[in-house]
Amino acid sequence: MSSSSVVRVQRDGELASVIIDNPPVNTITAAVRAGLREALHQLQASKDLRGVLLLCEGSTFCSGADIGEFSGPPKEQEYRQLFNGYEALGVPVVAAMHGTVMGGGLEIALACHYRVAAAGTRFGMPEVTLGIIPGAGGTQRLPRLIGAEQALELIVTARPVDAARGRELGFIDEIITAELRSGAIDYLRSLVETGRGPRRTGEMTVAVASATAEVFERARAQARKLYPNRNAAQVAVDVVQAATTLPFQQGLEYETKRVNECKDSVESKGAVHVFFAERETRRIPGLADSVTARPIERAGIIGAGTMGGGIAICFANAGIPVVLLDANEQGLTRGLANVEATYQSMVDRGRLSAEDKAGRMALIGTSLSYDALSDADVIIEAVFESMDLKRRIFTELDRVAKSGAVLATNTSTLDIEQIAAVTRRPRDVIGMHFFSPANVMPLLEVVRTSQTSDETIRTVMDLARPLRKTPVLARVCYGFIGNRMMEGYAREAERMVLEGATPRQIDTALEAWGMAMGILAVFDMAGIDVGVNVHKANAAQFPPDPTYYQADFALHDAGRLGRKNGQGYYRYEPGNRSRIDDPEAIRIIAERAEQLRVPQRRHTTQEIVERCLYPLLNEGLRILGEGVALRASDIDVVWTAGYGFPRYRGGPMFYAETLGLEVLLAGMRKYQDTFGPMHWQPAPLLVELVQRKLPLGDYESLRTGAGLREGAR
């Protein structure tokens, strides 16, 4: 008996199985909902039905609702009526779950009368991370099943739980250790045979002891801590609290009202924008579908330091054998020990088994000879930022690497055209800029030169998937997308401490605005010497400003390297990551400011945020106008995935439009009047967009057509 192309009903005597098959992850799309409605009508019309099983084909039960519908007309009433229909059936309905059951997928299961799951299934309510709340009954059914306190923990933290924890909490009735479908059918038969009928969640009440005033106040405090500047988690607390006072149907209607308010917020629109922007990065205009990736079966990495070791872990995690090469045995020993320590920490935290650790370590070989890389399909150079050293390495790689091997550099600033020029195969050379720690950070800047082949680009963009990276394609320029934009952002932070602001004042303002970490604390973490060396090596790139990055230079001259030696912009105690304000650092910076005759001034929080963010946004528009980035949304992905820019603000380019391009332009001109034109020139694209009253989306549409300026003539 068939219901639709994505939902079908199969009968087994008096039992019916409703089977969803909507690859890849059984998203609850409009087609799935239509199929579920048709299946529901069949079930309602059946005279001899005694039980229903809801399950999914493929790798997972319903992974969630269709996020693509968020920007369209509200669908919550449709979900509510559909799920209520299954809950209202007069025979027991069992949801049989496996894989990753999130959001709407868990909500449809909550509308069923009983729930079983395969061992290892994971469940979650991640909606607040997208700036919304569960909108298909989750805020009303979950607290009725497991109590308000535990429901709030799941909804507010958005942390997933496994099937065992779900059983403990009470929303899972049984864990199926046999084959899921046969085990779930046996469970359903046992319900029918013992006369256990429907058990409707909507008819339950929330346990009073789980819903005290103290419980809700703790949840609000947790929401404030986890989500500063955001509202969705606070709304979630409101709506869960309503489940304790409102009748079920009224509670569902209140949930609908509040979720649609959330969808209209900048918080939600920004988070959803980033979600789709991350998917879009792999679509490369002009790269034909006929261009295929080369197979990557073996890898090589040059440099066994922190970055090289982290990249090796990425390959081992992907099941790809990798050879780690260094200049001496001590470097290899130290690098391999760091890799082992990283894996051991995962074992200690229960994130990896000892057997898996051993298997992954076995995939990482070491060598002192470039000849060991002769069979690698991709070789990544990950040594420190020295053009001479990198060119020597690529000369050697040109000698030993097999034909067709991808030759990649992890440089964060250097001209890859110059690196590629020492090889006889510049078409195979590309930038693969990982972010530290490489085994954790999701961003991968993929940098193509003027000669990089389409096949090489496709290979690296596809390789990002098994490495669990989000790739963003860029063209060659100093700093590419992310670090080039950081120049102005960090420049102003350093300039303001020279003007008398404290490091704590700068970082607190940026963190309160939403950055994951203040920029001066970032410099301490990365190593002040790293930034100083980059600026010394690239001095010709920067404007003739004697105060440029001089706070860094002053601290470095005093031997302060950041966390690595416990002294930077802040002081650090051994074994303690906390930042301690240090009068000595402030004194050193003040002395340098006096030598440079930097005028002192008082800084408001607003000025700190504007002076750091405006150059960041402006440079992003300059990069977009120059074609260094393919799309504004790619810039947003770089900064949200690699630099701690808040996802709920949508990334720098999304935020620029939220702020108002005319406001940004006025701000650039305001600070130009105060500090002069050297650092405060508005990007040509910003000026043009404001003059023509065009949003970025219209600019990009015109550019992909005949181009903005061509169309203007």
Image: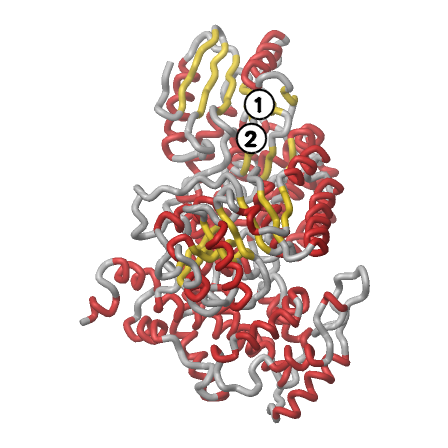
Q: Residue at x 61, y 82 (%)?
A: 550
Q: Nearer the viewer, mark 1 or mark 2?
A: 2
Residue 674 shown left or right of residue 627 in the figure:
right
For the point 56% across and 27% down, the residue is 98
**Residue that protrudes farthest toward the right in the picture:** 574
- Report the front residue among 711 and 370: 370
Structural distance between the alpha carbons of marks 1 and 2 = 20 Å
Earlier residue among tags 1 and 2: 2
Q: Residue 112's x, y, as percent?
A: 54, 25
Please identify the quarter of the rendering in which residue 345 is found: top right
Name the element at disc 2: loop
For label 2, the residue is: 99
Judge whether 536 appears above or below 655 on screen.
Answer: below
Q: Amino acid at mark 1?
A: His
Q: 352 or 401, which lies in front? A: 401
As drawn, 490 above or below 468: below
Which of the image's four quarters has the N terminus? Answer: top left
Give the number of the disc on residue 625: none
Residue that badge 1 annotates: 113
Residue 394 in picture, x, y percent from top left: 49, 58
Outermost residue, left direction? 713
Q: Is residue 89 above or below residue 342?
A: above
Q: Is residue 534 visible?
A: yes
**Secondary element at tag 1:** loop
Image coordinates for residue 53, horizontal then vertical, percent: 52, 18
